[in-house]
């Protein structure tokens, strides 16, 4: 079972130009955008690495979606003038996301089942974090982006759980209640606006 660390958030330096005043957002909204950018990067980087080790198609396919998730948040950061930095693959400004990435990679390298379990866990964490951050903002465009990305993460979770089923393995939900998890799995593939 992967233990999710307590997350702290700090603003990262960047040279990007702003199209809207950063004070249009609260400190919380700014921090949330930066954090979610790096969390989506964690998903992409993890899946890219695991795709080099295992033949499961979910990793390469979902890594492409995670890039789109990063791009969607990057657009919001640029629109609101929120500074952010994209470090090279496998590196993160947020020290606790860095540790989480390292732990996930170590687990995912053990077996294909472990790798698919890592994927399911990342998507569950993403769903929880996106829903929480959607509740923090009063900006409709930011909330809609978070909701679209959470929709994509629900689809990704279903894909990873299906992959585990191919090995006759099951995923034990973390960070969601059993009822929330069951409701996601009972749903069919969602149209999430390209995410």
Image (cartoon, rainbow, N blue to C red):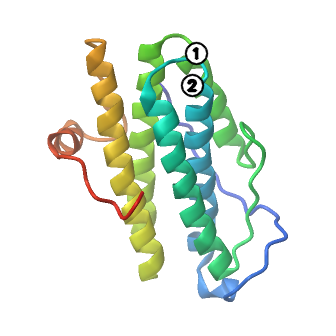
Q: Decide which of 46, 178 is in the foreground and name it.
A: 46
Q: In the drawing, does residue 186 fall left or right of residue 62?
A: left
User: Could you tell me which residue is drawn at 28 percent across and 58 percent down?
Assistant: 191
- x, y percent for residue 134: 41, 67
| Residue 172 visible in the shown view | no
Q: Secondary structure under badge 1?
A: loop
Residue 108 higher or lower than 173, as above or below: above
Distance of label 1 from label 2 (alpha carbons): 7 Å
Q: Quadrant of the N terminus?
A: top left
Residue 108, quarter of the rendered image? top right
Disc on res. 58: none
User: Could you tell me which residue is drawn at 55 percent across and 33 percent down?
Assistant: 47
Q: Secondary structure under badge 2?
A: helix
Q: In the drawing, does residue 87 fall left or right of residue 181?
A: right
Question: In the image, which is nearer the foreground, mark 1 or mark 2?
Answer: 2
Q: Quadrant of the C terminus?
A: bottom left
- x, y percent for residue 95: 72, 42
**Label 2: how many residues lie within 10 Å, few (<14), some (14-19) or many (20+)?**
many
Q: How many marks?
A: 2
User: Could you tell me which residue is drawn at 38 percent across and 59 percent down?
Assistant: 131
N-term-proximal mark, 1 vs 2 = 2
What residue would you read off at disc 1?
Answer: 109
| Residue 61 visible in the shown view | yes
Q: Are marks 1 and 2 in contact (CB under 8 Å)?
A: yes
Residue 193, quarter of the rendered image? bottom left
What residue would you read off at disc 2?
Answer: 50
Residue 25 higher or lower than 34, as above or below: below
């Amino acid at each position: 079972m992967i233990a999710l660390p307590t997350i702290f958030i700090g603003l990262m330096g960047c040279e990007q130009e702003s199209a809207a005043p950063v004070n249009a957002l609260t400190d919380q909204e700014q921090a949330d955008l930066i954090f979610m950018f790096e969390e989506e990067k964690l998903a992409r980087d993890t899946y890219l690495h695991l795709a080099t080790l295992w033949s499961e198609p979910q990793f390469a396919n979902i890594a492409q979606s995670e890039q789109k998730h990063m791009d969607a948040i990057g657009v919001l950061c640029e629109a609101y003038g929120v500074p952010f930095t994209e470090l090279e693959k496998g590196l993160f400004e947020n020290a606790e996301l860095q540790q989480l990435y390292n732990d996930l990679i170590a687990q995912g390298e053990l077996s294909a089942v472990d790798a698919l379990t890592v994927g399911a866990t990342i998507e569950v964490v993403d769903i929880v974090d996106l829903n929480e951050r959607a509740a923090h903002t009063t900006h409709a465009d930011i909330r809609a982006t978070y909701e679209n990305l959470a929709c994509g993460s629900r689809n990704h979770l279903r894909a990873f759980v299906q992959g585990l089923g191919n090995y006759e393995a099951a995923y034990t939900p973390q960070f969601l209640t059993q009822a929330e998890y069951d409701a996601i799995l009972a749903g069919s593939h969602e149209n999430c606006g390209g995410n």
